[in-house]
Amino acid sequence: MKNVLAIIILSLLVSCDGPYKNCPEYYFSDDYKAYTNFNENSYWIYSDTAFGITDSVVLLNQNIEFIDHCDYNTQSQETLEQLFSSSFVDNNSSEIKIHGHAFMQEYNTGYKLPQGLFTDNTDLIDPDYFIDSLEINGVWYKNVKVFKSNKYESYWAKNIVLIKKVFPYPWDSDTTYHFDIVRYHLE
């Protein structure tokens, strides 16, 4: 009986969740950073001509840090957190918080917020997501990546960020907005 009890206790101790040693480390690729990493106070102005609405988006704060902790639920990885203000979004706050995780190479706002999804993890995207160039309001944008998810579309230009966004707002609404970039300024 003591042997059985000792085996059970040993099994419980061995199965306890880490931190583990010699875990892989994940960093954002240069390509990922070219589409998502910008200086604070950069801004983008979008227009939906069908509804006559403008959305002004400003990057208020950005932080990239390395989380050096690895266990069953966490990877050692770079993380990105950005805080934007938006003149359009009204969810009791005009701020949109964006998170990026190097382990999945993804960038998103989470549920119900119209800012976008970006990833360079080819397992998560349609292989036809890349457009060599796209014209919006008389300006040609190059190296455009397109992401379509459920009711949402986002178009990203390298070194410029989000140039087009299509989404319902509120999320469960039948009203779909089509915002195209009008101008931007990168700090």
Image (cartoon, rainbow, N blue to C red):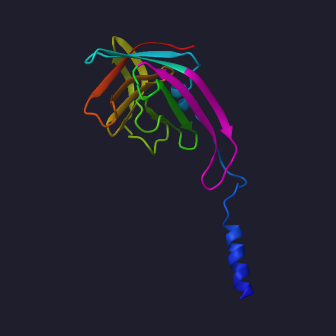
> Viewer-proximal residue, 170 or 126?
170
Q: Quadrant location of residue 71?
A: bottom right
Left or right? Give the position of 18 relative to 167. right
Q: Is residue 136 magenta?
A: no
Image position, residue 46 (x, y; %): 38, 17
Q: Residue at x 56, y 28 (%)?
A: 82
Expressed as whole percent of the image width and height from the top left, the position of residue 22 reads 72, 53
- The outermost residue toward the front is 92
- Quadrant occupied by the N terminus: bottom right
Q: Left or right: where does residue 14 sit relative to residue 74?
A: right
Tell me, yes or no, if residue 160 can be seen here.
Answer: yes
Residue ID at (63%, 31%): 64
What secondary structure do most residues of the magenta stretch adopt?
A: strand
Q: Magenta part of the protein: which range?
A: 60-87
Q: Looking at the image, is 16 positioned above or below residue 38?
A: below
Q: Position of residue 128 (x, y in %)?
A: 36, 36
Q: Residue at x 42, y 32 (%)?
A: 113
Q: Is residue 15 above or below residue 151?
A: below
Position of residue 8 measured from the top left corner of the image (x, y, whole percent): 68, 77
